[in-house]
Amino acid sequence: MTHPIPLRRSRLRVLAAFCGVGGDTAGYQAAGCHVTGVDCRPQPRYIGDEFYWGDAIEFIRRYGHEYDLIHAGPPCQYDCTLTAGTNAAKRGSYPNLLAPTRAALESTGRPYVIEQPPGRASRRMRIDVTLCGEMFGLGVIRHRNFELGGWSTPRPAHLEHRGRVAGMRHGVWYEGPYFAVYGEGGGKGSVPQWQRAMGIGWTDVRKEIAEAIPPAYGQWLATRYLTTVAALEVAA
């Protein structure tokens, strides 16, 4: 299904649903957008322009039509690779939010982005774009898939990784250009290393950094969306 692209020449208003600390938000802001975040948990270190504490899906349904673009990254535990393997027994305790989120987004009539990591969700969403830290010279690999609703952009080339993720594996330390930004296990890198690797400097809380996406991803998406809008304006 396609939606009309709102042709606004003022500052783009973006809704960041399930915003967390605002990794994607910082990227949209870097592209010149005004970003409102909503999350079911208080986020005192959220970097956006506005924040609402509440149910993200309900917020999208009630207010999503007021925004130019909606970025939604519902919690991924139900579908992620780790749950499919090591923690498979816990899968039933996590909410399955992908389909309800998409339904809420479709109800707004606004263009949107759905963000998910690789995993089961890859079989339940259309993967229009895949981004990787190597595309932006980051110190993480951090693959993320994106479904684009109501707009499109060419799929970027996935660059070859420069090496392996640094860290301890079965008692052996491996060097590499990337850090594993998740969990609390040994060999995962220090907080400053995580901050530099992700491009996130406004929080030093490991869990918040681990749950975010690099701001570079949000900036890339915003830039591509704005390019799409500009092209339609020229053609109009």
Image (cartoon, rainbow, N blue to C red):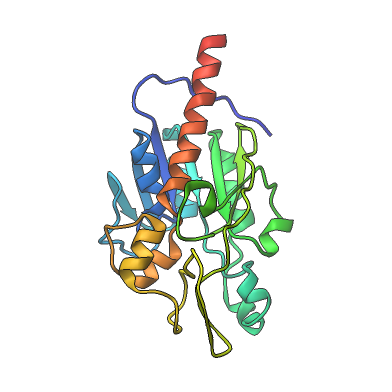
Q: Position of residue 25 (x, y in %)?
A: 38, 47
Q: Splitting the image into 4 quarters, where does residue 13 fall?
A: top left
Residue 19 seen? yes
Residue at image point 48% right, 39% down: 220
Q: Furthest-bottom residue in view?
A: 171
- Relative vertical location of residue 65 with respect to residue 82 in this rendering, above or below: above
**The C terminus is located in which quarter?**
top right
Q: Position of residue 5 (x, y in %)?
A: 54, 25
Q: Position of residue 59 (x, y in %)?
A: 43, 49
Q: Position of residue 181 (x, y in %)?
A: 46, 69
Residue at image point 50% right, 39% down: 221
Residue in front for this viewpoint, 58 or 40: 40
Residue 236 seen? no
Horizontal side, residue 69 vs residue 155: left or right: left
Residue in front for this viewpoint, 162 or 94: 162
Residue at image point 56% right, 64% down: 76
Horizontal side, residue 52 vs residue 91: left or right: left
Residue in front for this viewpoint, 101 or 193: 193
Count of marks, rendered view: 0
